[in-house]
Amino acid sequence: MEVKFGNLYYFIYLIILAVFMVLINIYFGKVDAKKRYKILIIISFSSLLLHFSKMFFYPYNQDISYLRKISFENICAVSTLIFPFILLSKNKYLLDYVMVMGLVSGILSIFLPLEAYSNEETFKAAFSFDVMRFYYAHFIILLTGVLLYRFRLHELSKKRIFYLPITFLSILCVIVINELLLIRIGFVEYSLDLLFDVNYRNSSLIFGIPDNLNSFRYILTIFVPKFLKDPYIPIIWLVIPSYIYLPLMYESIRYLNHKNILIFKEKRNDWFF
């Protein structure tokens, strides 16, 4: 009864999340426009609350070193921790990050949930607390991006397109600093080899492409000079791809929004157009 890519439980979770996505969008369509943003903030804080409450459940309650699991460990953990406060701040540059990365990382983490499959530290039974928590947290990340986009709670602008890579690379720096602090405290096993091992605590690709993502190696590194990836220079190797792929994602989402693709229309109150 474990969740594995393509098995029955994998599709059960996708179906459940798809149903919730539809129902929440229908609900938002019936809610007063002024209240939507406030409800989204509450939804975002629910994920933050769950993020910290997991310390009361197995396996996180087994060892104090599991406190590392509520830190800025990876991109999605950072999203869970900062999205509610960015929504409160209404900073347009940071909301750009929330919308784009909410949509992109949310989709990737739900359809290709590597952490839920490969992290041996956690209990992986299909309906264990940890797996359900994983899906809920990443669903909220995706839902935040979807609701911002579909109900135009935030709109992207060409003037801000190249600020997104800066924000993204800054988030990666936060993750690296967090990792160094965890090592200093003793919550993470350390050796120079482990620190730069692409298969060890590297879900954010800071230290290169892990073996389980070999299928995507070419597209991720095609624009990276050889001297930056042999071996990979942490974060620096991601600068060029960030300034190519992230603006493309940004502009694609902005274009779809501008063309009213999958945008909720107040008067017609329909789903697709």
Image: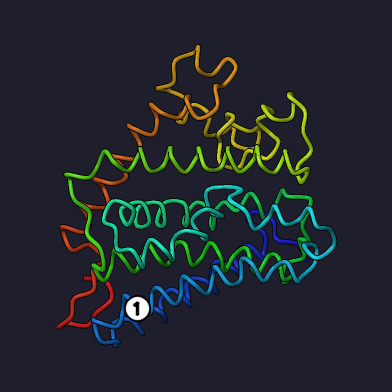
Q: Is residue 128 above or below residue 4?
A: below
Colour scheme of the picture: rainbow
Provide the residue designation for mark 1. Answer: 38
Please give left or right for residue 173 compared with residue 92 in the image.
Answer: right
Q: Is residue 270 above or below residue 169?
A: below
Residue extending farthest right: 62
Nearer to me, 269 or 199: 199
Q: Quadrant of residue 210?
A: top right
Residue 5 placed where, x, y %?
A: 64, 54
Query: Within 10 angstroms of label 1, few (less than 14), some, or many (20 or more) residues?
Result: few
Nearer to me, 20 or 197: 197
Residue 234 placed where, x, y %?
A: 55, 27
Quarter placement of the C terminus: bottom left
Identify the residue at image location x=38%, y=26%.
240
Residue 225 placed where, x, y %?
A: 44, 15
Residue 248 placed where, x, y %?
A: 29, 40
Q: Quadrant of residue 102?
A: bottom left
Please give left or right for residue 220 compared with residue 119 in the image.
Answer: left
Q: Is residue 249 above or below residue 82?
A: above
Identify the residue at image location x=34%, y=57%.
99
Kindly identify the amino acid type of the residue bearing the numbered disc 1: Lys
Please give left or right for residue 183 compared with residue 235 in the image.
Answer: right
Identify the residue at image location x=49%, y=72%.
45
Q: Secondary structure at mark 1?
A: helix
Please give left or right for residue 244 compared with residue 225 in the image.
Answer: left
Q: Is residue 94 above or below residue 220?
A: below
Total marks placed: 1
